[in-house]
Image (cartoon, coloured by chain):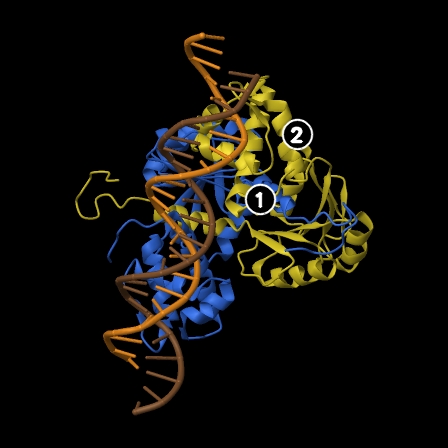
Chain colours: A yellow, B blue, C orange, D brown
DNA sequence: TAGATTGTTAATCGATTAACAATC
DNA sequence: TAGATTGTTAATCGATTAACAATC
């Protein structure tokens, strides 16, 4: 697998490819061209071919890509061909929601440890997992060799959880709290704060009638 | 407010600026420079200045930006200076979690209508809102003049909800279902599917020990 | 063979960064 | 006045797209 320097834009498209491919596979479609993928995803076919070509030659000229094979390849690239264990801190509604996703997910990412420091939560059951106190975080993460952590606590507690994750050796964090968090350079953090998404969505609402102009302009 | 063509990258940074500014404001800091914002957000100060300059001149040379004033300006740009009503479909755990965010949010985006077609859910209460059946979606959205919709149903039901949102005249959709959805050109859809985030995070895990090389290479 | 489609190079497009005059 | 910082132009960098030889 040749590996130069892959841009973040490329990496962010890989899970999307995986999603369509899974869909195609469940409909028992065996082969797909970059052209067809492009239509489905509103992407330029050349971009799709180029993205994949960073990692190797997976297609067949004149034919396209084998769906099952490409799924396997992208899983390998994303390192989710084996089960990846994930820890979650914050056993509220959102934490529950994410744990439940587990059951239906086709991906090999499983939440295998849940933590919360609220006494009422500790010891309760979420989807077959017992909620553990934060004091057990470091030991459990080490024991299970967990490398990814999810934060679903309120904003004011988020930085504290980040720090504990970092001490525990977590390498990647998915943060749902609406807060700006500091991590050391070697730890990666992705923000899934939905208020950001909502706010940027609001920007695109046209203000019709604002100056008595009803035309939808581009 | 001068308005050329604003790139999506710029729009996506505005909510982040708003977040830091709110934080600064709550700490009663009155003025901030692009330099300081850059440090906090790991962004180039020139980029921050340029982003803001697309919309007007809001800073003072030699001084920086007035925090309160800039918050107001960005709210105006994002069109969240008045309350924006949002509809949500899918009263499961995730739907509950998002409704609860409402209470604490400093943003002016409020979920004011919740829908679900599961008989056990209809009529129940979430955070002072009564869950309505889907049959009432069009009427309620028209009545409340709702323009943004959130989807928190399972993947296989998501496209159906999209279609109903579109018929109801919704202009922007925030989708949490792990599905690829089709919308007409005039409707905007943002995906908040957390599995995508998790998968791209997995890519960045180094594979130490894989070829007996423990060095963390950049 | 003719048609389709890949992988890849070159061209284009757009976004980020550097630099600096203006000015608080 | 000297120091700081903006708004903006020009330079750089990187990502997307077009084009096409190779080949199934």
Mark drawn on residue A205: none
Quarter residue A164 falls in: bottom right
As helix, strand or loop, the secondary structure at mark 1 comes to helix
D23 left or right of D20 in image: right
How packed is label 2: few (under 14 Cα within 10 Å), some, or many (20 or more)?
some
Residue receiving disc 2: A72
How many numbered markers are drawn?
2
Write down the chain letter for disc 2.
A
Residue receiving disc 1: B197
Instruction: Classify the position of the C terminus of chain A by image quarter.
Output: top left
Residue depicted at 42% across the width and 33% down the height: A44
Residue depicted at 49% across the width and 33% down the height: A48
Q: Is residue A199 among the parts visible in the rendering?
A: yes
Above or below, B96 against A105 in this view is: below
Instruction: Classify the position of the N terminus of chain A by image quarter.
Output: top right
A136 left or right of B10 in image: right
Cα–Cα span, label 2 and label 1: 19 Å
Q: Are marks 2 and 1 on the same chain?
A: no
Coordinates of residue B197 in the picture (x, y in percent): 58, 44
Quarter residue A165 falls in: bottom right
How packed is label 1: few (under 14 Cα within 10 Å), some, or many (20 or more)?
some
Coordinates of residue B101 in the picture (x, y in percent): 52, 51
Coordinates of residue B56 in the picture (x, y in percent): 27, 62
Above or below, B196 against B182 in this view is: below
Coordinates of residue A117 in the picture (x, y in percent): 71, 58
Most foreground residue, A77 or A106? A77
As helix, strand or loop, the secondary structure at mark 2 comes to helix
């Amino acid at each position: 697998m040749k590996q130069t320097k892959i841009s973040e834009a490329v990496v962010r498209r890989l899970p999307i490819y995986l999603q369509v491919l899974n869909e195609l596979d469940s409909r028992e479609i065996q082969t797909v061209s970059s052209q067809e993928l492009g239509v489905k995803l509103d992407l330029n076919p050349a971009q799709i071919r180029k993205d994949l070509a960073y990692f190797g030659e997976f297609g067949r000229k004149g034919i396209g890509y084998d769906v099952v094979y490409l799924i396997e390849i992208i899983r390998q690239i994303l390192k989710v061909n084996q089960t990846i264990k994930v820890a979650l801190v914050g056993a509220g509604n959102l934490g529950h929601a994410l744990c439940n996703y587990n059951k239906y997910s086709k991906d090999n990412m499983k939440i295998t440890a849940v933590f919360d420091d609220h006494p009422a939560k500790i010891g309760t059951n979420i989807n077959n997992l017992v909620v553990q106190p934060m004091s057990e975080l470091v030991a459990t993460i080490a024991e299970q060799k967990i490398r990814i952590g999810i934060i679903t606590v309120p904003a004011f507690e988020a930085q504290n959880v980040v720090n504990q994750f970092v001490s525990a050796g977590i390498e990647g964090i998915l943060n749902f709290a609406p807060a700006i968090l500091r991590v050391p350079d070697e730890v990666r953090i992705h923000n899934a704060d939905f208020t950001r998404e909502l706010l940027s969505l609001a920007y695109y609402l046209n203000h019709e009638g604002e100056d008595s102009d009803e035309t939808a302009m581009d």
